[in-house]
Structures are given as C-alpha cells and as structure tokens.
Amino acid sequence: MGKRSNGEGTLCKRSDGRWMGQVTLDTDGGYKRKTVYGKTQKEVKEKIAELKSGCRSGKLIETSSMPLEDWMQLWIANYKPDLKVTTRESYELYINVHIKGSEIGKIPLSKLKTTDLQRFYNAKLKCECKNQKQT
C-alpha cells in the first residue's frame, strides 16, 4: 500500500487481525481524531468515508450537548440523504409526532440513558406520553 494523501486518514492491520482506520476531522472547537475498526480493509475505508460524509463541508458536527429532537432532524438531513421519498416522509412523521416536543426530545445526547428510552417506550405503550394521539 502506497502513501496516502492528506485528509485520507490512516489504515493499518492490527496484531489481532482486525483493520483500524483513523481520520482527523475539523470541529468547531478544533480537530478531533476518530478511530474505526473492521474485519476488512474495505469495511474500514467505508466507515472512514461515512465519517467524512457525516461532516458538513468537512467539519465534524459536535452533537454531545445537542437535544435528541435536534439530532434527529440533523440525522435525517445529513446521514440519510438517499432515502426514498415515502421512507423519508414516514421517518419525519415519526420524529415530529413522537420525539419533537416530548420530554425525551429535550434530553441532550450526552445525558440520554437507556433508562430514559425504556421509560419513554413504556409510556408510549400505556398511551401516557405527551404528543401521542389516542384513537
């Protein structure tokens, strides 16, 4: 394997047989080095490409303090650009009906816990959650 160009990242095979890739991404607060692992070199290259495509104009979007409802809007716009129209519409409907404006939608991603999700699911099952239409 020849020398890689600037911005392509680093690829190497680890002693345990897995492949590792690293790439430096530009964030609003500086640069962050992200590492991905995979069984094959091709898999790692795809993961690096996905990391880079998740950046808006080459900048990594810091999401840890972002509320879940904002992240869901960002996710559908930036990470799922190739969805069929009907799939996109149904995802947006789910986000707007169940997440946006709810208690769970206001929780920052860094503070979101599995117990929060389970509480949310249980409330949905019991029809106690805000924004749920009863039929």
Image (tube, helix red, strand yellow):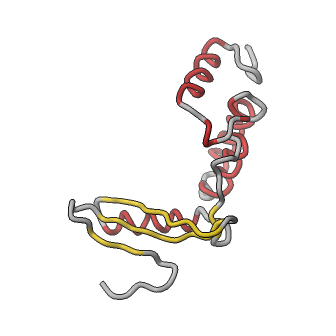
Decide: is 114 above or below 26.
above
| Residue 133 point in image, percent of width and height | 75, 19
Left or right relative to 43: residue 102: right
Decide: is 84 above or below 26.
above
Residue at screen point 64% across, 69% down: 30
The quadrant of the image that shows the C terminus is: top right
Residue at screen point 67% across, 50% down: 85
The quarter of the displayed image where residue 25 is located: bottom right
The quarter of the displayed image where residue 20 is located: bottom left
Left or right relative to 31: residue 97: right
| Residue 111 point in image, percent of width and height | 62, 37
User: Which one is nearer the viewer's eye here, 27 or 11?
Assistant: 27
Residue at screen point 63% across, 48% down: 64
The quarter of the displayed image where residue 14 is located: bottom left
| Residue 35 point in image, percent of width and height | 43, 62
User: Which one is nearer the viewer's eye here, 99 or 20?
Assistant: 20
Left or right relative to 1: residue 17: left
The quadrant of the image that shows the N terminus is: bottom left
| Residue 6 point in image, percent of width and height | 50, 84
Decide: is 120 above or below 82.
above
User: Which one is nearer the viewer's eye here, 25 or 83?
Assistant: 25
Residue at screen point 43% across, 65% down: 46
